[in-house]
Image (cartoon, helix red, strand yellow):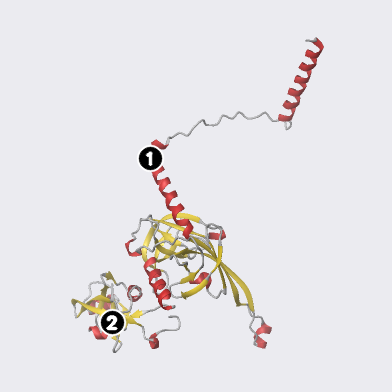
Amino acid sequence: MDPRRVLLFIVIGFLAAYAWWRYEHRDGRVPEKFTPAEAPKLDLNDVKVLAALDAEYTKLVRTVVPSVVSITSAGYVAAPQTLQDLLLGQRRVQRAGSSGSGVIVSKEGHVLTNHHVIAGMTEIQVQLSDGRKSPARLIGSDPSTDIAVLSIEAKNIEPLPLGDSDQMLPGQQVFAIGNPLALGESVSRGIVSARDRAINDSGLEFLQHDAAVNPGNSGGPLLNIRGEIIGINSQIASNTGRFQGISFAIPSNTARRVLESITARGRIVRVWIGLQMQNLTPRLAANFGVPDTDGVLITDVVRGAPGELAGLKAGDVVRKISGKPVRNADGLRSILATAKPGEIVEVQIIRAGREGAVKVQVSEVPAQFLTPQQ
């Protein structure tokens, strides 16, 4: 080969190498030495239990997510009144929107959600996990339990079953799925923190858990490890409006009662036994021969009501209903709320210091005894 051509190739190679070096060191830095790890420190066989849990969590989520929906709603609400509005007696409205979650509970397309997600809204739309959208029809709603039932028309949907929330115990694992902050199909995991948690004077008792719940999760399901709905996420306790480790779900047994009542009658049916009552104090408990303050004192029984027909009397102290302890008046109402008209419940009482039991057939509350909220 011509020596001049060889020399030319050497010069070109040198110039190219120099140009590359100058480019790599254009900022004056020398590249850091970097040697990545060659393989994981542990094999899956070393963490078999964790690997199995990973696979089971994934299987559970993959199975239930298609039954969880995102809900958007819109309508007109009262606008802030100006001084001129007040002087002229005018009322203004403004368009408002809301977002939340829901869960499909029937093959016909019934969706459970929160009342507050759709309250006052006239346009409701549901989006399925596969992206399909469908307008929703409001079948019925119950403000006192914060449960609403919607209906959508969609093919190839798979409902989730309602489990027995009474069987859930503190420490058991739960999964919250929903549409937090409009992100859609988000999953969080936690445990049941407490049962029968009253957070206001509504008489409704909640399941408390620590799965992350944020605005937009409302109406979404709380699931057990079998993929059963054991609660409908409703509220959080927070100073910031965001998750702080304390979440509340409406028990599935309460949601089931409202769902069955609305789908059957188009409204919520409330039952009663016709008692007027007050919570026990240490002094009252001692006076009526009760060892502690758990229970309620019957102060009067409505004439002709189921309680009177069964033999309950003023002065009786109700301790349990159908085997469930009654701590106070709100607890008694919460237990009765799970019963159906015509169902017979056993009321365990203390009368004049002696224990006894009375069987009462509950009935629907007569219209004259319903409050406006009910």
Question: Disc number at residue 48?
Answer: 1
* Kind of residue at badge 2: Ile
Q: Foreground: 60 or 360?
A: 60
Q: Position of residue 132 (x, y in %)?
A: 56, 60
Q: Secondary structure at mark 2?
A: strand
Does 366 sit left or right of 282 as displayed?
right
- CB under 8 Å between discs 2 and 1: no
Q: Position of residue 205 (x, y in %)?
A: 38, 69
Quarter of the image where the N terminus is located: top right
* Kind of residue at badge 1: Lys
Residue at image point 27% right, 80% down: 361
Q: Position of residue 199 (x, y in %)?
A: 42, 69
Q: CA distance from mark 2 to mark 1?
A: 58 Å
Q: Is residue 244 visible?
A: no
The residue carrying mark 2 is: 298
Q: Is residue 292 visible?
A: yes
Does 228 sit left or right of 129 as displayed?
left
Quadrant in which residue 123 is drawn: bottom right
Q: Secondary structure at mark 1?
A: helix
Which of discs 2 and 1 lies nearer the camera? The answer is 1
Mark 1 nearby-residue class (10 Å; few <14, some 14–19, many ≥20): few
Which badge, 2 or 1, is on the more N-terminal residue?
1
Q: Foreground: 213 or 43?
A: 43
Specify the farthest residue to the right.
Answer: 4
